[in-house]
Image (spheres, rainbow, N blue to C red):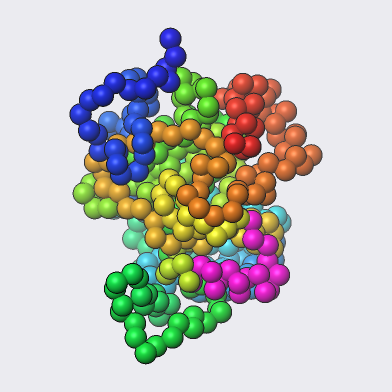
Amino acid sequence: MSNERARPPGPATAHQDLHSEHGALRGEHPGRARQPVIKVADLAWLEFEKPDLARAEVFARDFGFAVAARTGQALYLRGTLPGSACVVLRHGRTSRFLGPAFRAAERADLDRLARATGRPVRDLGEFGGGRVVDLADPSGFPVRVVHGTEQLPALPEQPPLLLNVGGSRARTNATQRPPREPARIQRLGHVVLETPRFTQALDWYLETLGLIVSDFLFLDGQRGRGPTMAFVRCDQGSTPVDHHTLAMTLGPRTGYVHSAYQVTDLDAIAAGGQYLAERGYQRSWGIGRHIQGSQLFDYWRDPDRLMVEHFADGDLFSCDLEPGWAPMSASGLAQWGPPATRDFLGANPTPALIREVVRALRADNEIDPGRLLGLMKAMNR
């Protein structure tokens, strides 16, 4: 009997009328661990390797980052909101993602994590200071959990525009002339990772770091095999947090997909995008509004072709909202906006991608011909 039949009518659940039309069927992934080791408070920063830090800094400033510090071997980027640096660029031979750092809510969480994993707590020993436990997730990504890092003061904001909306006329005798300038980054929002070990990696983040799922996506006709994408948030109890801090998707590659950075509003996204276009950078997809998370979005490629996103107006969820479930499709990624590009979807059949697919099909993971065909169909729906 199919596992994709409609749910019988019953009492309303937390997800209904809020973020997804459907919730879980009986026996499906609960989207959270019963007793996680710790519950991280937020995503602290992301680390990348770059062969040319000077070129990387030019793009970073054009994209809207401020420079918090620089050394001969690293560049520390920040947003306008108070907190730690949100991106660390380290000098290296290639351009690649190194891994995320999550912020522990308490110093004692590091000790608890160290006891559970056998990894030591040590001094970070670089700009920002603090203490860290270095881990690795089942996909092989280095994952840091940090506490006690220096909190940088706020920088001047890019003020939101005052809008006349319907019968509400807040602005009179004044024009709107937003400057065409970089969209000032406020903070780091989320990172998206691809892995052929999707379920194992997802469970590790839920059980070790206490993250919880906001939304699951599944392949058409394959819901019984489990989800293939998860939008995952931090659990701060009744305090609302971003719809997703981490998103994970099943795929033949193990790697970084994109990272997202909050800006003030739609005008900041649009004017900042025009500024980037005039300087010759490549837009990957946008401007539009997502379905899962509701963010206004605009995706760009840096000079090394890593994808980064400007976003604004994302959903905020507290801990009591259940995961939503929806079919995975390219057309289901946005409420409005241009169709998702093949560049954004990573669907261009390059020799490197073909090699990754062949390697994944031969390895012990969740990629098999049925899953691969389902993912290909989803990219074209």
Q: Is residue 150 visible?
A: no
Identify the residue shown where x is 50% and y is 53%. Answer: 336
Q: Position of residue 335 (x, y in %)?
A: 47, 49
Name the spot of residue 73 as percent of width and height, x first.
61, 66
> Is 56 rendered above or below residue 376?
below
Estimate the x, y position of residue 281 in percent, counting from the top left: 68, 66
Residue sitting farthest toward the right: 351
Q: Quadrant of residue 163?
A: bottom left
Residue 61 in the magenta stretch? The answer is no
Left or right of 233, for residue 70? right
In the depicted structure, whether residue 24 falls above or below residue 135: above
Q: Nearer the viewer, residue 166 or 333?
A: 166
In x, y percent, where is residue 7? 33, 22
Give above or below for 155 relative to 342: below
Name the chief secondary structure element in magenta. Answer: helix
Depth check: 27 or 117 in front? 27
Q: Classify residue 200 as left or right of residue 195.
A: left
Say which quarter of the image contains residue 203. top left
Q: Residue at x 37, y 67 (%)?
A: 83
Determine if residue 203 is in view. Answer: yes
Residue at the outermost bottom position: 173
Residue 271 part of the magenta segment: yes
Quadrant of the image containing the C terminus = top right
Q: Residue at x 44, y 34 (%)?
A: 326
Q: How many marks?
A: 0
Would residue 76 appear left or right of 12 to someone viewing this image? right
| Residue in front for this viewpoint, 60 or 288 | 288
Q: Which residues are magenta?
A: 268-284
